[in-house]
Image (cartoon, helix red, strand yellow):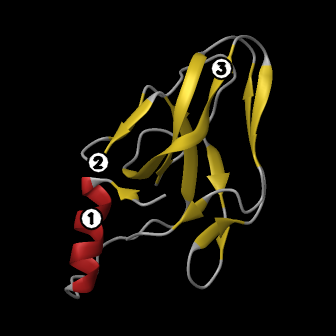
Amino acid sequence: MTDLTDYAKNLLGRALCGRVPSLPVAVWAALGTGGADSTGLTGEPAGNGYARQRVTFTGTGPQRNAAALSFNFTAAVGTLTHLGLFDAASGGNPLTHAALSSPVSVGGPGTITVAVDALTVTPE
């Protein structure tokens, strides 16, 4: 994931200038139907068992998810095309987003899993 939101760019800018911003203490992954640098992830599902998943990262350079993420659905939500990171389990500030390697259609109950090390954050 290299597409930082405007919020994240401003956060990093303040940090680089020694302004001591309030950095996230935890990060949650979310799924959606699109993404933009200004707003982050768009089209996030509501209901149907969906919930953002807390992510723990590891690494000294590029950051990778340390555990698999499981998004569970109890009903159809359509086709999901993007994954984004936020600083809260709901609401909060968007940090980054990227397209999935391939769209995933959720036509009924099921689970979308992101394998260990499959989510990489490399700001450029």
Q: Position of residue 81 (x, y in %)?
A: 53, 31
Secondary structure state at the residue bearing disc 3: strand
Q: Are marks 2 and 3 in contact (CB under 8 Å)?
A: no
Amino acid tagged 3: Ser
- Callout 2: few (<14), some (14-19), or many (20+) C-alpha neighbours within 10 Å? some
What residue do we see at 47% from left, 47% from top?
A: 98
Estimate the x, y position of residue 107 in percent, counting from the top left.
70, 11
Q: Residue furthest front?
A: 102
Q: Quadrant of residue 73?
A: top right
Look at label 2 and name its amino acid: Asp
Q: Dividing the picture into quarters, in which one does residue 77 lie?
A: top right
- Of mark 1 and mark 3, the one earlier in the sequence is 1
Task: State yes or no: discs 1 and 2 in contact (Cβ < 8 Å).
Answer: yes
Quote the CA–CA distance across marks 2 and 3: 24 Å
Count residues near mark 3 (Cα–Cα under 10 Å), then give few for <14, some for 14-19, many for 20+: few
Is 106 left or right of 123, judged from the image as shown?
right
In-image side of 34 versus 26 (left or right):
left
Q: Which residue is mark 2?
A: 37
Q: Residue at x 56, y 75 (%)?
A: 62
Hey, what amino acid is under mark 1?
Lys
Question: Which mark, residue 33?
Answer: none
Residue 2, given in percent of the width and then of the height, sits at 42, 60
Residue on which disc 1 sits: 9
| Label 1 crowd (10 A; few <14 / some 14-19 / many >=20) | some
Mark earlier in primary sequence (1, 2): 1
